[in-house]
Amino acid sequence: MVPSRLDQMRAMAGQRGDQTGDAGAKAVTAAAVPRPADRSASVPAIDRGGGITAAEPWSWGGGAAILDRLLHASQARLTGSLSPASLTLAYLDWALHLANAPGRRLELLEEAARQWARLGTPPRWIAPARGDHRFADPAWARPPFNAIAQAFLLGEAWWRDATRGPPGVAKSHGDVVSFVTRQALDVFAPSNFPWTNPEVVQATIARGGRNFVDGLRNFAEDLQRLAGGLPTDEAGGFVVGRDVAVTPGKVILRNELMELIQYEPQTGTVHPEPILIVPAWIMKYYILDLSPNNSFIKFLVASGYSVFCVSWRNPGPELRETSLDDYRRLGVIAAIDAVTAIAGGQKIHACGYCLGGTLLTIAAAAMARDGDDRLLTVSLLAAQTDFTEAGELQLFTDESQLALLDDVMWQQGYLDSTQMAGAFEMLRSNDLVWSRIIKTYLLGEREKPFDLMALNADATRMPFRMHSEYLRRMFLHNDLAEGRYRVDARPVAVSAIRVPIFAVGTEADHVAPWRSVYKIHLLNEGEITFVLTSGGHNAGIVSEPGHPGRHYRIARRAAQGFYAAPEFWAETAQEHQGSWWTAWVDWLDARSSAVGPPPAMGGAEKGYPVLADAPGTYVRES
C-alpha cells in the first residue's frame, strides 16, 4: 500500500524527533518503560486523531496548508516566535490614534520639558519602581552615575506615559506597545554598559580588568552549551534522586503520560484521607520535592498524611496529538482511581499547582457534574480558573500570535522548553536576563548553583495539541470561566464544585497574578479560604517554615458569603509571619478524620503493584 501524505508527514516528524533527541543514557523511550499489563484496560490510551478536522490548529491540513506552516515556522526562528503582524497592528493602532490627537502630543511635549527640568533639580528626582533593583547599589548614589540613572528613569517614565495611548486605542494593543517599548528601553539601561555601571567600573579597577577575562570565558562556555542544545543554567551537580526529589516513595502506576508516586509514611499514624498532588507539566514535579530542607512533599508526609504525586512524562514528537483532556483522563482521573483503591475508598484532599491546578479544577467540576464525590477538598496553588486578567502572558495570546505558535509546534510536535523560557524571561527581563548578563559577563561571576536553578535547567516540553488547546480555550477564549469548556461533550462549571477550596496566590507572581487567582471567588459560591503569600510563582509556593522574610495573609469566605474586592481583601485579611504551609496543614487537619495506620504501599491485588522506587523514570527523561 502506498503511504498517505499524512503518514509521510508523521514519519518525518518522528525522524526529526530521533535526530534532535538526546541520545544519552538519560533518554527514556516509550518502549523502554514497562507498563503494568493489568492496568491497560482501566487506563484508556491517548486518542490519536479521533475527531480531528482540518479546521483544528493541530491538524495536518493539505499541501497548501503544509507549505504555509513551514514558511511561518521558518519565519518564527527570526522573530523569536513573536508574530510580526501582531506587533505591527498594535503599533499602528497606537501611532494612528496619537497622530490624530494633537492635544495629546502637546501634553507629551510639555511632559518632556518638565522631565528635563526635573533632571536639573536633584530634590525632585524620582525613585526606581518597586522591584527594580538595577540601581540599588550605593555606588549609584554618587555622581555622575546618579545623574545617568536619573536621566534613564525620567525617560522611562515619559515613555511609559506616552505608550498608554490616547482614547480609542484597543487595550490589548496598548498593552503590547507598552510592554515592547519597555523591553526596548531595558536594553539601553545604563546598568547594562560597563562604562556607565559603577559596580562594573569598581570591579574592573579592583581586579585589573580580570572580570572581563572571566566574563569572556563564561560567554564562550555558554555559547558552547547553547550550540550543544544545553541550557546555560548549570545543574551544579544536583542529581535527581540523590540531591533533589529524594523523599522516599514508590511508583505504583505508570501510563503514557504520567507516573504516580506514593510516598512512604514518616509517622506511625496518618490521617485516613490521602493528599493527591497534581503539579504543572511545564516543569518537573520536584519543584515540590526539592532539597530535603525545602521539600513541600516531605513536609506533608512528616505532618501525618499519605501523599501521592503525579510525575508527568516529558513529551516528544510522538505525543504531538495528546489533548488537554488526555491529561485529565490519564493524569488526574487515573491518579484518583489509584489513590481511592489504595486508600480503601477514603475521600481525597486534591491539590493542584499552576497548570495542574487549572486541570484539577476542570476534573473536579466534571466529577461534581457527574455525581462523583471522591474529592474531600480542593487546593489550588498559584492556579488560574479565570483568564481575563492573566497578566502579561496575555500579550502573547492573540489570534495572530497563537497561529504562529501553532505552526512552530506543528513542525516540532511540541513547544520546546527554550521557547517557553523566553516568554517567561521577557516578563521579568531585568531580573532574569539583564542582571544575569551583567553578573556573568561584565562582572565575570557565575551564579552559585542551587536546587531551583537545577530545576530550571531540567526543562520540559509541551505537546502540540494540548498546548494549543490550553492557550486557545483558557487564555484566548476563557472557556472554563464562561461555561463553554466541555468534558465528554458536555460543559463543566467551576460553580458545580461543592467541596471546600483552599487557594493560594503570590504577591510577585508574573505567571499567575494573585488578582487573577483570586477570581475563584467569582466562580464558586462555596467555602473558600484564600492565602496571599510573599514571593513569586515558584518561590512563593516553595516557602518552607523557617525561611527568613516570609509572610502571608489569610481569610476565609463562608459558603454563600459575600464577595470582597481583592484590594479590600488585601487590606482586611490578617497577616502572619512565616510560611503558609503550616496554615494549610491546619486547614487540612480540621477537615480530616482521626489518625490511624497508614495504607500499604501500592496494591498488586488491586492492580497497582510497586513498579519502581521514587522518583521513577519519567522525571529523568530529558
Image: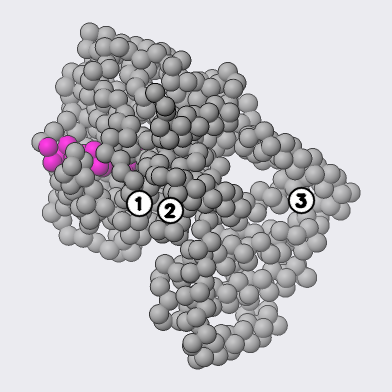
Amino acid on which the number 1 mark rests in the picture: Arg
| Residue under the image location 67 percent in, 38 percent down | 226
Question: Which residue corresponds to mark 2?
Answer: 402
Mark 1 neighbour class, 10 Å CA radius: few under 14, some 14 to 19, many 20 or more: some
In the displayed structure, would residue 426 be above or below residue 240? below
Looking at this view, is 63 or 216 the one in front?
63
Identify the residue position indicated by label 3 in the image: 442
- Taking the image as shown, residue 348 lies to the left or right of residue 200, namely left
The residue carrying pointer 3 sits among few (fewer than 14), some (14 to 19) or many (20 or more) residues within 10 Å by Cα, namely many
Residue 503 position within the rendered picture, expressed as x and y whole percent measured from the top left? 30, 46
Closest to the observer, 157 or 329:
329
Q: Is residue 573 above or below residue 21?
A: below
Which residue is tagged 1?
472
The image quadrant where one finds the N terminus is: top left
Q: Secondary structure at mark 2?
A: helix
Point out the tag, 3 or 2, that comes first from the N-terminus.
2
**Magenta segment:** 356-370
* Measured Cα–Cα span from mark 1 to mark 2: 8 Å
State the predominant SS element of the stretch in magenta: helix
Q: Is residue 339 above or below residue 411?
A: above
What residue type is disc 2 on? Leu
Identify residue type, mark 3: Leu
Tag 1–tag 2 contact (CB < 8 Å): yes
Tell me if label 3 and label 1 are in contact, CB under 8 Å: no
Give the answer, above or below, for where 76 lies relative to 600.
below
Distance from label 3 to label 2 (Cα)?
36 Å
Q: Residue at x 57, y 23 (%)?
A: 239
Q: Is residue 213 left or right of residue 277?
A: right
Residue 545 visible in the shown view = no
